[in-house]
Amino acid sequence: MNLLKDMGTINFGNISFADIKEYLPIIIPLALVEVALLLAAWIHIFRHKNYKRGNRVIWLLVSLITILGPVLYFVLGKEEE
């Protein structure tokens, strides 16, 4: 059997690999935005010592919450320069 040929028949519960391929044009850009926001938040967190609320450890943990964490950091935690 050819593994690549059989990829279309892999099932995850009721979701097949073919179903997932339909959503890749949506999933990939969202994943890229999430990674970019996370990296931007971490760079800012490590370069600055002062925050509106909380401390560095809290904001590093909060930033790991999918796409919402970095957004929360930039809205609630980032100190104005």
Image (cartoon, rainbow, N blue to C red):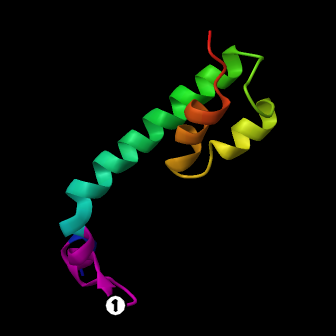
Residue marked by disc 1: 14
The reply to whether the magenta stretch includes residue 69 is no
What is the quadrant of residue 27 in the picture? bottom left
Is 49 positioned to the left or the right of 31 in the image?
A: right
Relative to 55, is 50 above or below? Answer: above
Name the residue located 60 percent from the left edge and 51 percent from the top edge: 65
Is 65 positioned to the left or the right of 35 in the image?
A: right
Is disc 1 surrounded by few (<14), some (14 to 19) or many (20+) residues within 10 Å? few
Give how far across and how far down residue 2 sits, in percent.
23, 75
Name the residue located 32 percent from the left edge and 84 percent from the top edge: 15
| Amino acid carrying mark 1 in the image | Asn
Relative to 81, is 78 above or below? Answer: below
Q: What stretch of residues is rendered in magenta?
A: 5-20
Work out whether residue 2 can be spotted.
no
Give how far across and how far down residue 11 sits, in percent.
33, 86
Query: Which of 72 and 64 lies nearest the eye of the viewer?
Result: 72
Q: How many labels does the image show?
A: 1
Work out whether residue 57 can be spotted.
yes
Is 50 positioned to the left or the right of 36 in the image?
A: right
The quarter of the rendered structure image containing the C terminus is top right
Query: Which of 22 and 17 lies nearest the eye of the viewer?
Result: 22
The reply to whether the magenta stretch includes residue 12 is yes
What is the quadrant of residue 25 in the picture? bottom left
Name the residue located 24 percent from the left edge and 84 percent from the top edge: 9
Give how far across and how far down residue 39 sits, in percent.
53, 30
Mark 1, secondary structure of its residue: loop
